[in-house]
Image (spheres, grey):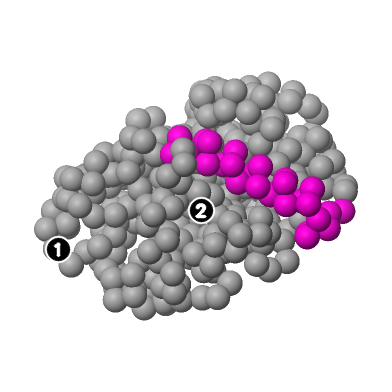
Amino acid sequence: MGRKPTADEPLLLTPGPLTTTASVKRAMLKDWGSWDEPFRDLNADLRRRLVDISGGGDDYTAVPLQGSGTFVVEAMLGTFIPRGGKVLMLANGAYGERAIKVCERMGRETVAYRTAEDEAPSAEKVAEFLQDETIDYVFMVHCETTSGIRNPVEAVAAVVAEKGRRLLVDAMSAYGALQLDAKVVQYDAIAASANKCLESVPGMGFVICNKSVLAEREGNAHSVSLDLFDQWSYMEKTRQWRFTPPTHVIAAFHQAMLEYEAEGGAPARGARYEVNCERLVNGMRALGFRTFLDDANQAPIIVCFHAPEDPNYDFADFYGRLAKRGYVIYPGKLTAVETFRVGCIGSMGPSDVEGVVATVAEVLAEMGVADGRSHAA
């Protein structure tokens, strides 16, 4: 941390893929035989460590899966929501909307509770929806990276439990930093990824789920490759993956988990991200930028900024100039206003964030943009 990024060795200000440590990268230099005992030991140890983060103990298990985060979200929805079941889908961004599309494509009945992209869902409103006794499940996104909003999973989970329903969570951008203690927050399953707050490389995700509920889902999945029950039962018997595992990615993830625990786990990582976020927001505001979200709703994962109103501003130019200096940001993903997004996670600290802000100021001056003020201000 505190490095000088370059175009060839950039700082990824994106919420996965993100900047990883050199030691995580080095872990991918060894080839592994997927049936060899050392690899099986590695896989089993990784699964155990993932469950330890959840706080769920022996009642929970970790089921890893090849692919991007969307793969494991679809696997979770398809495995846990009963065929003929009905699910209340909370959506205030692209990832909630994507989950709705997934459920509709695989024939699960959905009821959508949509809020604005800068508005968190209400637990009280969820309770109103659950007056419909045919709803089996509730699904929500913990941190919606469309905007960076932190949704109130704890409050919604309490209502879902009170009403005797079941909860599924897309914790993709939160797991490992914004922790949900399984002993406090009742859920059947949460989906997450290696390449977010756990700071590993892309290529696999995982689902943390209640063993007893998963055991009831044999034959429920809509897909062979995305069947979490089959993946789990096979791993329990063989300590191996059903299909070719991403061996190098698993080795990198295991190394990332060792570094995560050495840092101090969720409390330490979450605290580092909080400081990163605070430095980023304060620095960008000093340049005139306005955040899309109020501070009360902002998660320390990714921050969405309104684009400057200056006629010399062009996002593609802004992006390219930053990238040439070694800082890679995200375009906006909102439907109503022009924005861009800057991540707070990955192998970086406050000094790196200060470098980001200083470089943004340099680039604005080079572009002839007076400041970051927007029409939204």
Region of the chain picked out in magenta, as a range: 31-56
Q: Identify the residue position indicated by label 2 in the image.
A: 207
Quarter-of-image position of residue 93 = bottom left
Rendering coords of residue 85 (x, y %): 28, 71
Mark 2 secondary-structure assignment: strand
- The residue beneath circle 1 is 133
The residue closer to the viewer here, 220 or 94, is 220
The residue positioned 63% from the left and 28% from the top of the image is 261
Seen in the image, is 350 located left or right of residue 293? right
Dominant SS in magenta: helix
Earlier sequence position, callout 2 versus callout 1: 1
Crowd around label 1: few <14 · some 14–19 · many ≥20 (10 Å): few
Amino acid of disc 2: Val
Q: Is residue 40 magenta?
A: yes
Q: Would residue 65 be seen by someone viewing this image from the given angle?
A: no
Quick one: SS at disc 1?
loop
Residue 86 at x, y = what percent?
27, 68
**Where does the image place residue 236, in percent across and percent down from the top left?**
58, 56
Q: Quadrant of residue 154?
A: top left
Circles 2 and 1: CB atoms closer than 8 Å: no
Q: Residue at 84% of width from left, 41% of height from top?
A: 26
Tell me the quarter of the image containing the N terminus. Answer: top right
Judge the density around disc 2: few (<14), some (14-19), many (≥20) Cα neighbours within 10 Å.
many
